[in-house]
Image (cartoon, rainbow, N blue to C red):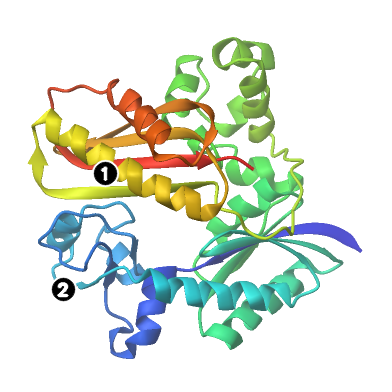
């Protein structure tokens, strides 16, 4: 029996839940985001595949989504409903002969021992469908990285295997930000080193990459490009890594005193969430989206782990001080990263 990692990802999760609640919407473009009013500021949380055909994606401004797809049905985010369905899915997965590591609402890793991983994966899809009437895609790999990336090639509703034997053929020609954990900023820095594709990063001199990114990050980037990942699938209960609050303003804030006051309010709400979590915050991150739509973040380490409002507020304001005060603000967010 071989060891495999499966990555289970619920397809268009929020939109799929809404279609189950409103069967008359099946086959129509559905957009979930904000309070469901596309005339207001806010962003898309999830779009159905029918809406995605019009270029509507997660993170698209609601107003832009309405322009791209005027016939879309816009619905508000219903956290309680999604929590309940997610819990049902994860319960179904835990009934399998597998170690289950929940990543969030709509995805999980499974550590399995099987001689037939595709058969096991199809069984996972069948079980999720039978219990919830939702579709999922399943990626198969020898490690988490391979399984996670494989899922994207199986969507929607399919199964895909990615291993060392197929890694370069599938991913080698793709840009480095196709790799899980590598974003656009890192990809741009790699381009400055002449490294543009996954194959080029895999073949890069680790010392050269380490000189630009630091010894740990440099080695990690090269290993990532080679498909290496030794992190285990852990079956401990899912624990949130952070707690955050944010607000989108229907009119831009150009008064920095008002921005300051909003950050204080958000910091106190986050502190209350942290206290309820019963785990202290160790770092505070402030997000600012400037008009028209550029987003930046700054973080501040706390002097000591805490759930007290005062130090969380001070850290949030210290992070806020590093932003440009001469631009109008359309969104503010405060997030506390939690300790163990």
Percent coordinates x, y for residue 170 in the rendering: 61, 46
Percent coordinates x, y for residue 66 in the rendering: 15, 63
Q: Is residue 269 above or below residue 106?
A: above
How many labels were placed on the picture? 2
Q: Is residue 12 above or below residue 261?
A: below
Which secondary structure lies at badge 2?
A: loop
Judging by the rendered image, the residue that carries numbered circle 2 is: 71
Q: Is residue 282 above or below residue 146?
A: above
Taking depth in this image into account, of 98 and 123 the one nearest to the observer is 98
Q: Residue at x 41, y 35 (%)?
A: 312
Q: Quadrant of the C terminus?
A: top right
**The quarter of the displayed image where residue 48 is located:** bottom left
Judging by the rendered image, the residue that carries numbered circle 1 is: 265
**The quarter of the displayed image where residue 125 is located:** bottom right
Q: Residue at x 50, y 17 (%)?
A: 194
Which secondary structure lies at badge 1?
A: helix
Marked residue nearer the N-terminal end (2 or 1): 2
Q: Residue at x 69, y 50 (%)?
A: 144
Percent coordinates x, y for residue 262 in the rendering: 21, 41
Mark 1 Cα-neighbour bin, 10 Å: few <14, some 14–19, many ≥20: some
118 displayed left or right of 81: right
Q: Is residue 115 above or below residue 92?
A: above
Distance between mark 2 and mark 1 Cα atoms: 37 Å
Q: Residue at x 73, y 69 (%)?
A: 118
From where the camera sits, is residue 195 visible? yes
Q: Quadrant of the N terminus?
A: bottom right
184 displayed left or right of 305: left
Taking depth in this image into account, of 235 and 286 the one nearest to the observer is 286
**The quarter of the displayed image where residue 42 is located:** bottom left
Percent coordinates x, y for residue 99 in the rendering: 77, 63
236 displayed left or right of 310: right
């Amino acid at each position: 029996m071989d060891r495999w990692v499966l990555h289970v990802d619920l397809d268009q999760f929020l939109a799929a839940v809404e279609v189950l609640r409103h069967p008359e919407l099946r086959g129509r473009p559905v957009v979930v985001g904000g309070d469901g009013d596309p005339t207001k500021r806010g962003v898309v949380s999830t779009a159905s595949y029918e809406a995605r055909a019009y270029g509507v994606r997660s993170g698209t401004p609601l107003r832009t989504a309405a322009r791209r797809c005027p016939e879309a049905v816009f619905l508000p985010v219903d956290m309680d409903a999604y929590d309940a369905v997610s819990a049902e899915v994860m319960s179904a997965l835990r009934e399998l002969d597998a170690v289950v590591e929940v990543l969030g609402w709509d995805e999980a890793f499974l550590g399995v021992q099987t001689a037939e991983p595709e058969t096991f994966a199809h069984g996972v899809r069948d079980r999720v469908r039978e219990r919830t009437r939702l579709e999922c895609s399943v990626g198969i790999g020898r490690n988490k990285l391979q399984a996670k990336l494989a899922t994207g090639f199986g969507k929607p509703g399919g199964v895909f295997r990615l291993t060392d034997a197929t890694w370069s053929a599938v991913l080698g020609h793709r840009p480095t930000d196709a790799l899980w954990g590598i974003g656009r900023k890192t990809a741009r820095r790699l381009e400055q080193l002449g490294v543009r594709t996954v194959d080029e990063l895999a073949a890069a001199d680790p010392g050269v990459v380490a000189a630009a990114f630091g010894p740990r990050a440099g080695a990690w980037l090269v290993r990532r490009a080679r498909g290496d990942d030794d992190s285990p699938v852990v079956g401990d209960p899912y624990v949130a890594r952070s707690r955050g609050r944010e607000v989108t303003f229907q009119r831009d804030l150009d008064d920095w005193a008002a921005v300051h006051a909003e950050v204080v309010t958000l910091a106190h709400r986050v502190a209350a969430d942290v206290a309820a979590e019963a785990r202290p915050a160790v770092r505070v991150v402030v997000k600012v989206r400037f008009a028209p739509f550029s987003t930046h973040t700054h973080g501040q380490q706390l002097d000591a782990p805490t759930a007290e409002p005062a130090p969380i507020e001070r850290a949030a304001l210290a992070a806020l001080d590093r932003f440009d005060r001469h631009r109008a603000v359309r969104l503010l967010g405060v997030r506390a990263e939690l300790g163990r």
